[in-house]
Image (tube, rainbow, N blue to C red):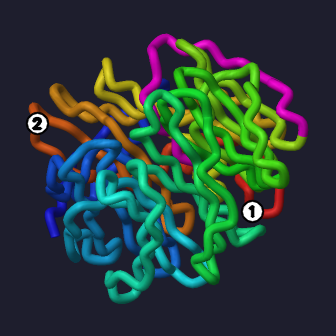
Amino acid sequence: MCTLLLILLTAGSAAAQTVLARIPIPASSATGQVVVNRVLNRVYVSAGFSSGGTLTVIDGKTLTVLTTISNLNGVNVDLKNDNFWTGNLTGGQVLTYSGSTNTQISANTVGFCPGETAFDGLRRRIWVGAQCGAGNDPIFVFNADTFALIAGPIATGGTIGPIIVNPINGKLYVESGGVSKAVDPNTFAVTPTGFGTVMAVDSHKSKVFATSGNNLQIINAANDNVGKTVPLSYTPGSQIAVNNALRHIYLLNPAANKIEVRGIFREVQGPLVGTFSLGTGNTPIGVAADAIRGLAYVVVNNAGSYSLWAIEDTTSVRQCGYVTKGNGNGE
């Protein structure tokens, strides 16, 4: 394990963060989705919509690479049975792997270029986004238990970007053609949302987090109303992670080589809690959170050399009075 004692100062306090490890990963696994299986204690980092992509599996206990699987793009985890779902882009297939063995157990040929996935645990669905749609990229929906196709191709009207499932009503948010859209979980109709690109959800507080320019938008997941707009001093990166236990969200600030930690306690107003400074030349491009172990996993690019940083988050623990605001444990 590549263990460090690198201390990261946080904004507005004398608190410090410890980087437990910086784990080298292939460039071909660094530009796509990052997810955590909290039960198996594994982290998955993947390629985006790029040829020659790979998927790297990391052991969260030893903080070492278990395996890198070739020709895979995008990843999400079925937390009921530990399977992970991915695509093979130009191969036109949606693939399912066993999380315990990292071996393929299913393949569905859909055509196009599948490379982005999202999981709906309540409805037992996997949503898959694909490019190569000639400017009208499609979405597909699968049964997570039988691997059967439920719907698709669902045309989105543009080039597809991030996809996120609303945990309250099951709709899918998708950026397509630079426009934020929603896919109805019953009719599969696609309509504009009127707000920014959705990056994350918080099922505990029924909130959706989106970015629009230099703003963080906090949205009611039940009715899609924007309840709070938080101005930022930077343009945030393309991923947000949620820690439901600490009541934190993590935003990427690539220009300043930082991770911004914001609070989502009680009314979920998004105040600044702290900042992880990654150091000169260390640009964050992806992020995921392990709420059980209090870790933020950050994909970092340093001059074309990529690594996954495991950062222990104790920002709010060191701030007097934060717990009285509610930390998700019985608030």
Closer-to-camera residue (304/108): 108
* Image quarter of the N terminus: bottom left
Q: Is residue 230 magenta?
A: yes
- In the figure, is residue 287 to the left or right of 156? left
Residue 272, position in %: x, y?
58, 27
Amino acid at dot 1: Asn
Q: Quadrant of the C terminus?
A: bottom right
Provide the residue span drawn in magenta.
Answer: 223-242
- Is 210 a magenta residue? no
Which amino acid lies under the numbered mark 2 shown in the image of this protein? Gly
Q: Is residue 31 left or right of residue 219?
A: left
Q: Quadrant of residue 125?
A: bottom right
Which residue bears the numbered disc 2?
Answer: 304
**Element at label 2:** loop
Residue 156 seen in the figure: yes
Between the residue at mark 1 and the residue at mark 2, the CA separation in whole angstroms equals 40 Å
Residue nearest the observer in this picture, 200 or 137: 137
Element marked by disc 1: loop
Labels in figure, total: 2
Q: Which residue is mark 1?
A: 329
- Around disc 1, counting alpha carbons within 10 Å, would you say few (fewer than 14), some (14 to 19), or many (20 or more)? few
- 225 to 103, vertically: above or below: above
Q: Residue at x 56, y 62 (%)?
A: 291
Give 157 or 232, whichever is nearer the viewer.
157
Of 65 and 196, which appears nearest the observer? 196
Residue 313 position within the rendered picture, expressed as x and y whole percent measured from the top left: 45, 51
Question: Looking at the picture, does residue 88 appear above or below residue 100?
Answer: above
Q: Residue 87's x, y, as percent?
A: 39, 60
Q: Considering only order in the chain, which callout, 2 or 1, is on the residue closer to the N terminus?
A: 2
Residue depicted at 41% across the width and 46% down the height: 287
